[in-house]
Amino acid sequence: MGRRGAGVFISFEGIDGSGKSTQARLLAEALGPDTVLTREPGGSAGAEEIRRLLVEGAPARWSPETEILLFTAARRDHLEKTIGPALAAGRIVITDRFADSTRVYQGAARAARRPLVDRLHALMIGIEPDLTFLIDMDPASALERGLARRSGEDRFEDLGLDFQKTLRAGFLALAQAQPARITVIDGARAAHVVANDILARYRAWCTA
Ligand code: TMP
């Protein structure tokens, strides 16, 4: 199952408040207790520490370059400690965000730093998910949902509606460029309807 022959690597992507975390959890529950559910930034002890530096504080806290390095450092630790070992053991790994988030948040939305993002990814990460679900959502409703949570992790949500619109366009452009890996899911439906859709598409992918 999956391109590696050992383990399956699935990512969920989308703008803040799109419901992707709920959907990642629901798919993990549907696929059984051996599934590893993880998230970025974070997913390992070291990467969770880096997460705090990234998601809390003023929006202009880091330069764009420093921010890309921190996300990549967190991802590298996540890969070494959590994702890599689980895939090698033949498990299904579901991550709430992976490298597409950096391509969009750091590479597209905040000045054109995509070449830098791509070079660092090739140098330090080097793998892509087998399958990515992009939960697509109207930015105004998604932003309302995201800020309503008041998690204290609002550094990116604080950047506002225009930023979220740019992010959505960035994610959709990635999906258009890589249709074999990225499946766009309409997130503006009841959570259980979205979850059934995702499970059906996952099952179809497994047998394709
Ligand atoms: P979360 O809300 O999905 O937990 O993600 C935390 C924030 O970090 C979210 O606003 C998106 C942002 N982010 C990036 O800007 N670049 C990245 O590479 C990742 C993984 C997340």
Image: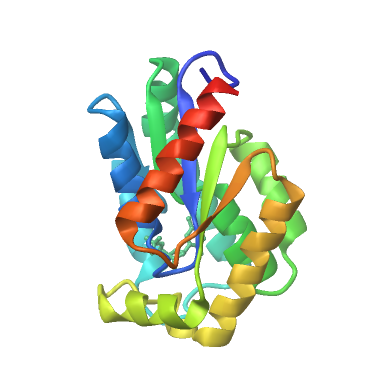
Q: Nearer the viewer, residue 100 or 168?
A: 168
Q: Nearer the viewer, residue 57 or 177?
A: 177
Q: Residue at x 60, y 36 (%)?
A: 128
Q: Residue at x 43, y 83 (%)?
A: 158
Q: Residue at x 39, y 70 (%)?
A: 17
Residue 110 occupies quadrant: bottom right
Residue 116 occupies quadrant: bottom right
Is residue 43 visible from the viewing direction of this image? Answer: no
In the picture, the quarter occupied by the C terminus is top right
Q: Is residue 54 above or below residue 22?
A: below
Is residue 56 visible from the viewing direction of this image? Answer: yes
| In this picture, residue 59 sits left or right of residue 91 | right
Q: Residue at x 48, y 15 (%)?
A: 6
Q: Position of residue 157 (x, y in %)?
A: 43, 78
In this rendering, the count of numbered labels is 0
Q: Position of residue 49 (x, y in %)?
A: 31, 54
Q: Residue furthest left?
A: 33
Q: Nearer the viewer, residue 64 or 151?
A: 151
Q: Position of residue 23 (x, y in %)?
A: 36, 51
Q: Quadrant of ligand 1?
A: bottom left
Q: Position of residue 169 (x, y in %)?
A: 66, 70
| In this picture, residue 113 sits left or right of residue 41 | right
